[in-house]
């Protein structure tokens, strides 16, 4: 039996609200989950009537309420997401001849900034010297993987305006206006590009991994030399974008199937 879409959507709204203790506006909820505003409004109205969500005054923003507050303390199971994505990350590295990584959003520790945590890394299939990156934390604003999380995941979207945009290279985004433009572009095309922003001479392409209800639970991407991933005009090579999106789509279906 297939999943019931209305229940999936209600759960995705609860998951989104659980990711941040501050109120979230109706329009923001609809945009992040890819819902029409009337649909999102209807779901929220039902959740309010059941005591799971509370509307904040007349602001049009919503918070978790009652027993649903316990969701705010639950972390996504990274090991489950990683195990479902591993075959598709392996395939991505094999087909592109590049290294491939999977990241999830990591909450600040000890007052530090939020980051993208590398939970799986596949070496490029050649004899070049490589270092395992599992456990590394990547800057959200300076990497393709991080930009996917900022633009498309509930947690990332909420933290983007407060990020300290520290430079990593001469190409790193360092102003809020630049970041807003880049995240808008990422949302509109469904993937992110990194061009010498974290490490000079390195580029990457990344796409989101969706869980149940369409919530972005991770990002996966391919990384290599700038000239390997990008054309002379700085645009990503179309064949790599296609491979990247196919792999992320397959990984998303695997993650959703795990929860079905």
Image: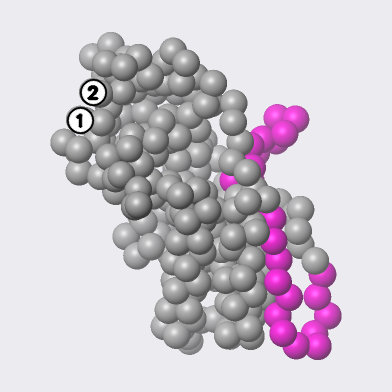
Q: Is residue 24 left or right of residue 122?
A: left
Q: Which mark is residue 45?
A: 2
Q: Residue at x 36, y 56 (%)?
A: 187
Q: Which residue is mark 1?
A: 42
Instruction: Tell me: residue 59, above or below residue 84.
Output: above
Residue at x 49%, y 23% (from the top left corner): 21
Q: Toward the viewer: 112 or 213?
A: 213
Q: Is residue 121 magenta?
A: yes
Check whether the beta carbons of the residues at disc 1 and disc 2 lie within 8 A of each other: yes
Mark 1 lies on a secondary structure that is helix
Which structural element holds mark 2? helix
Res. 91 visible in picture: yes
Q: Position of residue 246 (x, y in %)?
A: 44, 74
- Residue nearest the viewer, comparing 154 with 50: 50
The percent position of residue 158, horizontal first and vertical second, equals 46, 36
**Residue 223 visible, this angle:** no
Q: Is residue 92 left or right of residue 192?
A: right
Quarter of image, res 171? bottom right
Who's the residue at 25% across and 31% down the image?
43
Q: Label 2: few (<14), some or many (≥20) within 10 Å?
A: some
On screen, 184 above or below 30? Answer: below
Residue furthest toward the left? 38
The magenta region covers 105-131
Q: Tell me, what colour scheme is on the image? A: one colour
> Mark 1 Cα within 10 Å, few/some/many (few <14, many 20+)?
few
């Amino acid at each position: 039996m297939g999943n019931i879409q209305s229940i999936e959507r209600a759960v995705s709204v609860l998951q989104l609200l659980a990711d941040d203790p501050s109120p979230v506006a109706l329009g923001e909820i609809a945009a992040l989950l890819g819902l029409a505003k009337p649909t999102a409004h209807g779901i929220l109205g039902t959740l309010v009537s059941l005591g799971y969500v509370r509307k904040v005054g007349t602001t049009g923003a919503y918070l978790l309420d009652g027993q649903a507050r316990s969701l705010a303390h639950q972390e996504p199971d990274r090991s489950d997401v990683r195990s479902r994505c591993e075959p598709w990350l392996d395939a991505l590295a094999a087909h592109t001849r590049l290294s491939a990584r999977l990241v999830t959003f990591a909450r600040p520790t000890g007052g530090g900034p939020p980051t993208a945590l590398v939970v799986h890394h596949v070496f490029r299939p050649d004899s070049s010297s490589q270092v395992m990156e599992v456990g590394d934390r990547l800057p959200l604003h300076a990497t393709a993987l991080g930009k996917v999380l900022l633009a498309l995941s509930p947690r990332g979207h909420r933290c983007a305006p407060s990020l300290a945009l520290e430079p990593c290279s001469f190409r790193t985004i360092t102003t809020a206006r630049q970041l807003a433009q880049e995240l808008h572009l990422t949302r509109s095309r469904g993937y992110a590009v990194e061009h010498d922003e974290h490490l000079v001479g390195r580029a990457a392409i990344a796409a989101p991994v969706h869980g149940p209800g369409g919530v972005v639970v991770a990002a996966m991407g391919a990384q290599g030399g700038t000239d390997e991933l990008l054309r002379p005009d700085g645009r990503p090579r179309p064949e790599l974008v296609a491979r990247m999106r196919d792999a992320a789509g397959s990984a998303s279906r695997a993650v959703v199937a795990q929860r079905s």
